[in-house]
Each structure stands twice: as structure tokens, then as C-alpha cells.
Amino acid sequence: MIQGENSFLIYNIILQGIANTRSQISQYSLLSKPTVSKIVAKLIDDRLLIETKGSRRNQTVLSINGQHDHIISIDLGGNKIRLAIFSLSLDLVIKKTILTYNCQDRDDFIQCLVEDIRLLIIESHLTISQCSMISIATAGIVDHELGFILKGSCNLPQWEGFNLSKMISKHLSIPTVVENNVRSALVGELYINSFNQVNNILVLCLGAGVGSASLVEGRLVRGKNNAAGEIGFMLVSRDQLNINWNNEAGAFESSCSLSYLVYKYAQLTGEKLKAKCIFERSKKEDFIARSLIDEISDYLALAILNHMTITNPEKIIIYGCMVEFAEIFLPRTIEIIKRHSFNFTVIDIKCSQQGQISALVGAAILGFAVKYPKIEYMPNFKW
């Protein structure tokens, strides 16, 4: 374990790629060379750092020993579950994707997840003792400090009013933390894309459900009860005031998600098709498919424009299953946003190129932040 402020300072300097020799570290940290050498020797003895020969004569360079610790990272989605193991230096050890379990009972779902976690550890050729934490990114309103699901996703069974962290820890005897999946994706996007100078960003998740997460002035926004970003429940018309949405998917999610598209198309045509087929039909002059997708585009524009007036983000990143069809629905959305924006609030809207892994990376960072609060993967941001 790293001990002492100067030890963390040196570790973070190496982790962030600022310096990797004793001399450079001394210059950057303003610590004396003997002090740096003493701390580095202890970190090497504790197997936290590795020392190798450099390119110059008699030079040695220092690097993080990622194998010192590992975290199991899980992204629970309504359609797919992604599992991965990362080292302490955030090197990916193993990753796999499986279909979300077709379970109606929460206990059955948890049991399936536990078995897949055990299988992942075996396939990684690590032992369970080499994985000190589990970090789960899940849809829903999450108390990240307790690991408690306050309000869940309609796409996961009985996903409300229970402590997910304790349930997983009980089965595997590994400390477990839980975070909202879109917040995890935001952190992952920041890290993967090296957005060190982007202090205001919105991430939108469009898939079976809808969610969002915001970074405002470099700080992750959670809200008083961790409900910030639950735009699936945003109301977008006066008529929606007369509906009780407490036990429903949410007003916005019921107008701008793949679940809505599949349901509404079946209701209008009598054909129950997958979302991919509906998007394909929209390109072949299927009027109903095209009109439904235009409706989704318009509602998405409404949500983004409303969000822009509140937090004024620099960038918007869209991720989730719907990204696959962005060329069909996103141009209309962008055109509407341009039409209703001020010249000085023009925004950069992009689709995630890392959608398969961003929430996993973010969950790993947030998980390690609980165990190692002084390790700084991204020092400019506050979680």
C-alpha cells in the first residue's frame, strides 16, 4: 500500500506520464534527489513500481507495476452485459460481452452474474485474490456511496430498493462498488479521449433506455439524491403532466428509445420487428418507420437544446446501441439544434468511438478511486 503524501505525489507523476526518472521526478516535484530515491526504493520493494534500463547509458526508467492490483469492471445494460478486468495502471487484461440474462427474478439474475464473474477470472488466468475490487456500472438511480439501487431500470428485473454492492460482495467476498452506467461512460470517455481541457461535457446514452451524465466546471454532477441526469423522466409536453410516470419507463424514454421504436412500430403496423430492421426500412421509403425515426430525432433535439440552456456544455457525446444508426437519425437532430442555437453556443456533437468499453473504463477508474482515493488518473476532474 502507498503511504505518505510524497509517495502518492511520485506515484501520480509516473502514472500520468509526466516524468519517469529519478532526476526528472525531483525536478518536477521539487523534492530532493535523496528523498525521491528513498521513496522510489520503497515503492519498488512494495512492487508498486518497476525499474528498467533506459535508452541512455546508466539510465533507468520507472513505470507503474499494473499487476500489483486488479479490478473487475462490469457494465450492466438492458440488452448486453460487458465484463472486463483492468490492472491498476488501467491496462485491459480481458473483456467479454454477453446477452443480458432473460430472468424475471432478481436473485436469479444476480446468481447468473456471479457465475459469469467467476468464469471471467478463470479465463483471465488470474486468481480471485488478485482482484481486490468489483465495480459495477448499472442503469438507474444509484447511491454510489452505499451501492444501493434507489430506482432501477425497467430493462433489469426487480432493479429497485436493494443493495447490489452487498449482494455481490456476499457471493464473492470481494468489495464491490456501484455507479450509474452513464456517469461511468462519461469518466471513461474523458480518460480514453484525453479530454484534459474539457470541463463541460454531456454524455447521452441512447439504447433500450435513455440516460445522461454531465461534467460541469470539471466536476461530475450527481445531485442531492444521485438523480441528476435521469433525462428518461424529463417531460416534453403539457399532456404528459396528466400521466403518472413513477412506475413507467419515463416520458422522454417513452418517446426517444429503441424500446419505444419497436413498440410503436408494432402498434402501428402489427409487425414486431427488431430496431435494426425498422431503421433499414426507413431507408426504403417505409413511411411509418421514417416518421417514427424523425420523431425520435426531434425529441432528441428538444432534450439537447433544453440541456444546453442549463449547463452550456462544450461537447456532447452520444453512446449506446442507437449509435449504430446515427447516420439515419442524427443529421436531423443536429440541423434542428443549429437552427435554435446562438452563434456563441454552437456545440460539438459526436458519437462515441469507444462505446464498447467507455463505461467499463470509467467504472474501473471510479472503483479504484474508492480504494486509492489519492491516486489521480485524471487530476483535473472531481468525482
Image (cartoon, rainbow, N blue to C red):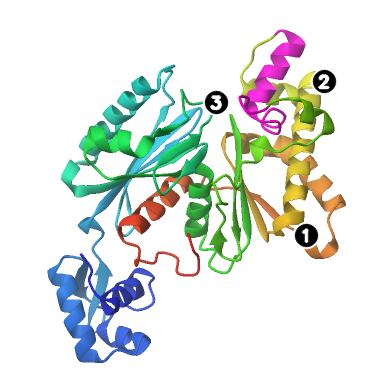
- Contact (CB < 8 A) between labels 1 and 2? no
Pinpoint residue 367: horizontal percent, then vertical percent: 36, 51
Quarter of the view holding residue 110? top left
Amino acid tagged 3: Cys
Amino acid tagged 1: Val
Query: Which mark is on residue 346?
Result: 1
Asked if residue 246 lies in the magenta stretch, the reply is yes
Quarter of the picture containing the N terminus is bottom left
Report helix, strand or loop for mark 1: loop
* Residue 70 drawn above or below residue 331: below
Q: Report if residue 375 is visible in the image.
A: yes
Furthest residue in direction left, as rendered: 45
What is the distance, in whole Å, between disc 1 and disc 2 at their CAs?
A: 32 Å
Q: Report if residue 126 is visible in the image.
A: no
Q: Earlier in the sequence, mark 1 or mark 2?
A: 2
* Residue 216 drawn above or below residue 222: below
Report helix, strand or loop for mark 3: loop
Q: Nearer the viewer, residue 230 or 258?
A: 230
Tell me the mark number nearer the camera, choosing from 2 and 3.
3
Q: Which residues are magenta?
A: 245-270
What is the distance, in whole Å, between disc 2 and disc 3 at their CAs?
A: 29 Å
Residue at the spot of label 3: 154
Amino acid tagged 2: Phe
Residue at the spot of label 2: 287
Tell me the mark number nearer the camera, choosing from 3 and 1.
3
What is the distance, in whole Å, between disc 3 and disc 1 at their CAs?
A: 35 Å
User: Which residue is depicted at the point 27% across and 38% down?
Assistant: 169
* Residue 16 drawn above or below residue 216: below
Pinpoint residue 133: horizontal percent, then vertical percent: 28, 47
Relative side of 42 to 17, left or right: left
